[in-house]
Image (cartoon, helix red, strand yellow):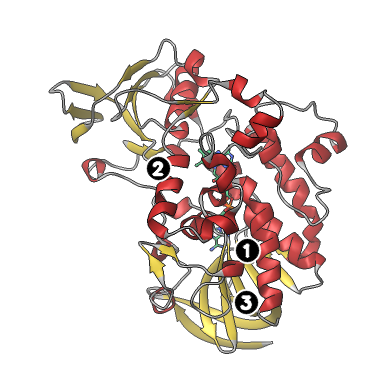
Amino acid sequence: MKANSVVIGSAKTHTVRTSAHCDVAVVGAGPYGLSAGVHLKAKGIAVRVFGEPMEFWAHKMPEGMLLRSPRVASSLSDPDRAFTLEAYEATSKREPCAPVPLDTFVEYGRWFRHQLASDLDQRTVLRVDRDQPGFSLTLQDGEQIRSKYVVIAAGIGPFKKKPAVFQNLSPQQAIHCYEGRDVRKFAGKRVAVIGAGQSALESAALLHEANAQVEVIVRESHLRWIGMHSWLHHMGPISSLLYSPHDVGPVGISRLVAYPRLVSYVPLRLRDRIRTRAVRPAGARWLPERLATVNITTGCTVSQASAIGDEVALKLHDGSERRVDHVLLGTGYQVDISRYDFLPPELTQDIRQFDGYPKLAGGFRSSVPGLYFIGATAARSFGPLLYFVAGTDFASRELVSGLSRSGR
Ligand SMILES: Cc1cc2nc3c(=O)[nH]c(=O)nc-3n(C[C@H](O)[C@H](O)[C@H](O)COP(=O)(O)OP(=O)(O)OC[C@H]3O[C@@H](n4cnc5c(N)ncnc54)[C@H](O)[C@@H]3O)c2cc1C
């Protein structure tokens, strides 16, 4: 083991120990990283997956949340499709539930990860550097690992959007939905929820049930709900022609997005239209009933937000005003790989991109040899399935064959 001192990031000095090598290092142990790791390991590849398993789901999603994706699209991927959600429920003697509760999904992911055994390393990766012929990864305790290939499966955590109008509010006053895990602390508070997507609407329902005074403020003229025409899904072979079981996107588009490789051949402008149409803001079908007594203001945006003592004053475009204690932002995510703080600028600037998304070729290969991206960052190349757990199967299989092609 070698030891020397380096400066990482701004001014922190770590003692670096170069102690281990692997063929493939996977950054992130969410559904994508765990699935990819299991596939690579099964091929006999020396892989190490870094990160706390299911951290984003366990610590960032609101307590009491239900998965929007159907059960059939909520399994992680392993080569034999043996470690499914159903297999976990049978092993742990849990009653199968639909929709799937957050806790069940987190526990399922933690059960799934045991396939990786000691190839899972729970430490955070602080930095990824090129170190020809591969990469070196610096871990939270200063240890350095060398790897020929690096797969980034680090999710959407750093990409949350905070619209400019809310920038002046403190982090306690304007909270992104994915930071509002414990909704009980908002009991008795006035909360304005901004947004019309699943995160915003489900958070509003949970806040309301936790006795907060909630108002949802929505730019769109009306709210959209997914799965309201459930009869369309119960017409046997006709339904299979209209929708894929993953249920991402509307009739027809749903079938196309189930084939990410096919989507990757569609011209970018059309691919973008398919992607945005498939994931436009909408709430799950079990939410309208839970929101029946919640104030919902549609067709309105917030033009000004200012802190007045402990309160937040909101001015809306229709001229009306609101005074609340907190604003919960369900304003979505914008992929921008330069916001992964473990990727130094000298590396990201060499990655060919379209507006923050890496341009990926077959096998999820980026323009930097040996560097791969899976999950949401791959959605601009392979379509919207990559935003969801349902994309883990395609991503893992394609990644393994891509790495094999690259002559590992
Ligand atoms: C509120 C909400 C609800 C959602 N509901 C659904 C749903 O019902 N169904 C569905 O399919 N999708 C849903 N999604 C989308 C969901 O985020 C993705 O499907 C899923 O998390 C993708 O998995 P991932 O592994 O790419 O990312 P993540 O689950 O985010 O995992 C990435 C992991 O990487 C880790 N990481 C990041 N940087 C580092 C580092 N430097 N070192 C080590 N580890 C690192 C993070 O801690 C994180 O745990 C939802 C998203 C949100 C925000």
Residue 149 numbered mark, or none: 3
Q: Quadrant of the N terminus?
A: bottom right
Q: Secondary structure at mark 1?
A: loop
Give me the C-alpha separation between circle 2 and circle 1. 28 Å
User: Residue pushed farthest left?
Assistant: 319
Q: CA distance from mark 3 to mark 1?
A: 18 Å
Q: Which residue is mark 2?
A: 332
Q: Indicate if the residue with disc 3 has its beta carbon within 8 Å of ligand 1.
A: no
Residue 78 position in % (x across, y down): 77, 54
- Pointer 2 or 1: first along the chain: 1
Q: Nearer the viewer, residue 403 or 291?
A: 403
Q: Amino acid at mark 2?
A: Gly
- Disc tally is 3
Using the rendered image of the protein, determine whether residue 185 is visible from the camera's viewpoint: no
Q: Quadrant of residue 222?
A: top left
Q: Residue at the spot x=54%, y=38% of the render? A: 252
> What crowding class fits label 2: few (fewer than 14 Cα within 10 Å), some (14-19), or many (20 or more)?
many
Q: Secondary structure at mark 3?
A: strand
User: Residue 26, can we see it?
Assistant: yes
For ligand 1, tell me if the residue under mark 1 lies within 8 Å. yes
Instruction: Tell me the amino acid under the disc marked 3.
Output: Tyr
